[in-house]
Amino acid sequence: MKFDSVIAANRFGLGAKPGELSTIGKNPRHWLLDQLAGPSRVTQAIADIPPTAKILVEVQRLRQMRRDAKKAETEEVAPDVVKQFRSVARKHYLQQTEARFQNAAATQFPFHDRLVHFWSNHFAISVDKQPVSALAGAFENEAIRPNLSGSFYQLLKSVEQHPAMIIYLDNQRSVGPSSVLGRRAAKRRNRQQEVGLNENLGREILELHTLGVNAGYNQDDVTALARVITGWSIGGAGERGRFAEGTPGKFEFRENIHEPGARTILGNTYRQKGLKQGEAVLQDLALNPATAQHISFKLVRHFVADNPSDDVVNSVARQYLESGGDLPTMHRAIVEAHEAWTDAHCKYKSPEDFVVSAFRAFDRVPDNGRYVVGALDLMGQTPFRPGSPAGWPDTAEHWGGADALYKRIEWANAVAKLAGPKSNPLLVGDAVLGPALGQHSRTAISRAESSVQGLTLFLTCPEFQRR
Amino acid sequence: MLNRRDILKSLGAGSIAASLPSISYANTGGDARLVLIILRGAVDGLAMVPPYGENRYSTLRGELSLTAGKTTTELLKLDAMFGLHPSMTSLFDLYRKKELLPIHAIASPYRERSHFDGQDILENGATRSSDRRDGWLNRAVAFFDSRLGSEAAIALSQNTPMVLRGANSVTSWAPSQLPDASDDTLRRIAAMYSSDEFFATRLAQALDSQRIAGASTNNEIRGRRNARAQSKTLMQAAGRFLNKTDGPRIAVIESGGWDTHANQGADRGSLASKLSALDKDIALLRTSLGDAWSKTVVTVVTEFGRTVKVNGTRGTDHGTATAALLMGGPVRGGKILSDWPGLAKRDLYEGRDLLPTTDLRSLFKGILSEHLQLPDNMLENDVFPGSRAAKPLRDIVNS
C-alpha cells in the first residue's frame, strides 16, 4: 500500500526525503517499529553539545559576577558582564537549536526523532527564563532522547531530576520549613531573606507531567508533593554559602533543606526518607490510571486527530497500564491503531513540522541555527520557547491563524528561492507525497511560471501543510 | 497590494465568496473600539495595584512590599488605600486625566490554580474549561458581522487566542521580516486553495490584514529584531487597524512571562521591568490611536492572582483574585473600583489568596454593554450564558 508509506513518512516521521518512500517500501509499520528499539543514531552536531553541568558552571559563574556587580556600591550592573552572560547563553542556544534541526532534517530515524520532540514538548521548559536558554537542547538530549526505550517512570525521573527542569520550575532553593535549614532560618531574627517552599515544580508534576489537570488532586496534594521534593536541587554551580555543596551543575539531593516526615498524596502515605520518598511518589504517579489517560490522549492527539475518539485513547492507555508503564509498548500501540492509517491529511502541521519537512523535501540541512530560529519565530513557534511549562498546543485550532498561514507562504516563497532553479517541483511533490498529492494541487504546481514558483506552490499546498 | 476582492475578481466566484460577510458600508453601527490585553502567567495584582493603605500589607509582603519608605522609587498614590506600581508612570497620567479605572479583587469564576485552565476560563467565558472551546469575544463578534465589510476582530499575533476562536470569522496579523510573495504567486495560491475551505478562508483574511497594515510596516521593522522594537511595531499596527473606518473594531494582544515564582522584585527587578514595558506599550498604543483614543476602551486582564505571602524563593505562587485595568477616552476613571475584602487571615481565600469580590465576567459584560452597546439578551444568552449572577458593572464607560 503506497498510501501507508506516505502516512508513515509524513505523519509518524518528519516528512519524506526524496527516496524515503521507496526505502519504507512494502512494510511501513515495520519501518516504524524498528525505530523504537533503542536510542537512534544522532548527527555529530548533537553529540557535540556540551553537557549541562559544564554549561551551567560557565553561565552561573557569569550570573554570580553580575550579582556581585549589582551588590557593589554603584547599584548599576557592569554592562559588559550582562552582555557577556547574554552572548554566552545565546551561543549555547543557537548551537543546540542548530544541532536539533540539523538532526531532524537529516535523520534516518524520523519516527524516533518525532517522539523525542513530542516528549520534550510534554516536559516543556522555555528559554524565556534564564539560564534555561543555555540548557534547553542539552535537556532534550540528556533527559528525553536516551529514555524512550524504557518505562515512563524512568523518563519522568530523569526529567524531574534534570537541572534544567529544576531551575525552570524553581525547585533548587525550595526549603522545607522543618528541615535543618528551615528551622535555623525561622529562629534567626531580622533574617535577610525568606526561606521556604516553592510549589511550582510540585504543581506542574501533577498537572502537566503526570495526572493532568482536574484529575482528582487538590491543593493539599500539591503542597505535600512540594514538601516531598524539597532538597531536589543542583550542586555548586557558582552558588555560595549553603548552596555551594555538591558536584557543580549536577543534580544534588540536599538533605539539609529536605522536609522530613511522612506525607500523604492522593490518599497514599509515603514514609520513605530523603530522595527515596519523591521517587516512590513518581513511581505511583507514573502508573496512576489518570496519568495513563492523560499521556495517551496527548499521544493519540499528536498522531491520529485533534479530537480523537475515546476508543483509541482508552486502548492505548490500557496497553500502557498492562505493560507496567512501558513507553515502547505505548508507542507501538499508536502505530498499530488502525485509526492512525485512515486519512493521509488529518493533522495540520505545526510550524516546526512545516519547516523540518520542507528541509527534508529539498534534501537539505539548515546550516545556521539563526536561520531556523528566525523562520520559526516568524511563524509563532520560536524553538524551545513555548512560553510556559504546558508546552506548545497540538491542534489546528491553535496553529491555523490567518496570519500564521501568510507567514508560511512568505517563508515558502523565500526558501524556494534558496532551493534553486534546478529542482523540478512536480518530481519533488511526487517523491514526498506520492499518491497523496491531489490533482488540483498537481495542476497548480505544473502550471507555475518558474520552478521557484512551483516549489512555493508545493510547500503551501494543502496536502503538504497537513500530515 | 492584492486583497481578497481582487482575488475574487480574478477567480470569478468560488468558496472564498462563501466566507465573505455581506458587504454593506451603509450602516456600520456604533463606532466604539475595544482592545483586550491578556497578560499570561498570572499577574501579581498586589504589586501592580498595591493596597499600601492596608496595615497588614507591608508585613505580609515583606521584601516585595511597595510601601513608602521601603523602596527608592516613589509609589504612585491613587487614593488613601491603593497605589500604582512605581514603574507605571504613563498609566498614572491617565489616572489623573480620569481615563484609567483600576478594578481590584477581581477574578474569573475559576477557583483552582492551573494557569492553563485559568486562561481557558478567562477566554471561554464559562465556568469550566471543558464547557466550551470557543471564546466569549468571538461570540460577541456576531453582533457586528452583518454590518461590517470585513472581520470585526483581529488577533495581533500569528495565531488566534482562544478568546477569539469560534464560529465567527476573525483575522490575525503580526509583523514580518520576509519579503512578500508576488501578487501572481498569491493569486495562484488562492486558486489552489479554492477547493479547500480551511485554507481559502484564512488566506482571504490574511490578505485583508496585509492591506490594512500596509506594506510599509514590514519595511519599517526589517532588521530590527529586539523585543522592544517588535512590540512598538505591534502597537503602531494596532492603532492603524483600529483607525480604519472599515477595519476591525476589536483587537486582542497577548503578553507572556508574568509567572513570578522567584526573585519577583519590588520597585526594581523582573516584575518591575515587565510592568514598565506594559506601561510604555499602552502609551504607544494611545499615541498610535490618535483621535480614535476617544472611542477606544483598553482592558488589561490576567487569569488569576498570586499568593499574598512571599514564597521561599522571593516570589509568589499561584493565587486567586488580582487587579484588572480599564482605560481609554470614554472610561469613567480617576477612581478605584473595589469591594476590598481585606488581607486579614480570615478574609483570605483558603487562608492564602486575595478573596475575589468582583467577577471578571461582570467587567466584560459591563464593557460589552456600555461601550460596544451589545443588547442584554445577546450578552446573557449568547456571550456569557448562565452568568446572570454576575451582573454587568455599570457606569464604567461613558456611552
Image: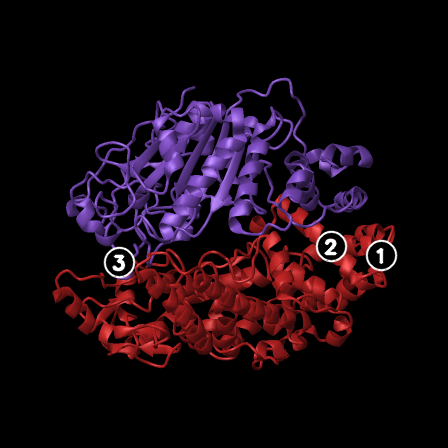
Name the image quarter holding residue A82: bottom left
Q: Which chain carries label 3?
A: B
Residue B81 is situated, as x and y percent measured from the top left of the image, at 22, 35
The residue labelled by disc 3 is B311
Any part of residue A336 in sight? no
Which sits in the foreground, B111 or B278? B278
Give the residue type that dot 1 points to. Answer: Ser
Q: Position of residue B183 (x, y in %)?
A: 78, 42
Amino acid type indicated by mark 2: Ala
Answer above or below: position of A53 versus A356: below
Q: Chain B: what color?
A: purple
Say which quadrant the N terminus of chain A sits in.
bottom right
Which residue is the extreme one toward the top?
A: B26
- Residue A451, disc: 1
Disc 3 crowd rating (10 Å Cα; few below 14, some 14-19, many 20+) is many
Q: What element carries label 2?
A: helix
Of residues B42 and B272, which is closer to you in this image? B272
Q: How many marks?
A: 3
Same chain letter for marks 1 and 3: no
Residue B123 coordinates in the image, percent (x, y): 45, 42
Q: What residue type is labelled 3?
A: Asn
Which chain corresponds to the colour red? A
CA gap between label 2 and label 1 equals: 13 Å
> Picture coordinates of residue A5 (x, y %)?
72, 69
Q: Label 1, label 3: how many angstroms apart (C-alpha)?
A: 60 Å
Q: How is the image coloured?
A: by chain
Same chain, marks 2 and 1? Answer: yes
| Residue B295 shows in the view | yes
Say which residue label 2 marks. A414
The furthest residue to the front: A73
